[in-house]
Amino acid sequence: MNYQFVDPSDAFSGDQGASTLLGKLNRAQWTDWKNRFAPKVDQLADMATDSSAPWDAAEQASSAMGLSFDSAQQAAAQQREAYGLSQNPRQAASQNRAHNINRSAAMASAGNEARISALDRQQAILAGGMGLSNIPDKVMNQ
């Protein structure tokens, strides 16, 4: 039976017309929910229970930050070259050391923030929208 179209005039047919119509409406709503919303619920459940998602997000963010720092270092070198500037070995070593420290710190920070955000997103899905970031500070500090 096709539950896509329910005829409201069925309520007036026979002794049990209204009951039959109510049954058809309920089955049509259930079929509609299964077709439209159940796949999204399954998708959210998969996202909420994926144990590798926070680590994947951390790895992607850390890698993106590393690439960004590498691009910035290359752009700075090209700019120095365009102006005809050169560094002595001590200056280059000092700049490389500072660059590597800043790069490592930024990569770690980006990875941690992405991991926390992914965990928060999972908790928000499981809690129906109340993730860790929505908990008041007063509750967290007690």
Image (tube, rainbow, N blue to C red):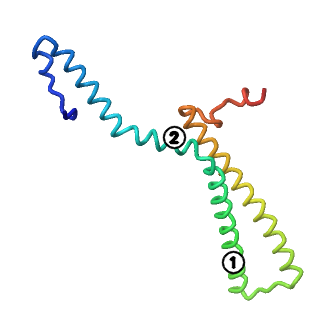
Q: Quadrant of residue 96?
A: bottom right
Q: Mark 1 points at which residue?
A: 74
- What's the residue type where badge 1 is placed? Gln
Label of residue 45 in the image: 2
- What's the residue type where badge 2 is placed? Ala
Residue 52, image x and y in percent? 63, 51
Whether 125 is drawn above or below 114: the answer is: above
Label of residue 112 in the image: none
- Residue furthest left in the image: 13
Residue at x 15% of width, y 17% of height? 11
Residue at x 54% of width, y 34% of height? 129
Q: Seen in the image, is 100 located left or right of residue 114?
A: right
Give the foreground label among 2 and 1. Answer: 2
Residue at x 34% of width, y 34% of height? 33
Residue 22, image x and y in percent? 24, 19
- Residue furthest front in the image: 1
Residue at x 35% of width, y 39% of height? 36
Q: Quadrant of the N terminus?
A: top left
Observer-nearest of 7 and 73? 7
Whether 53 is drawn above or below 25: the answer is: below
Observer-nearest of 40 and 112? 40
- Residue furthest right in the image: 90
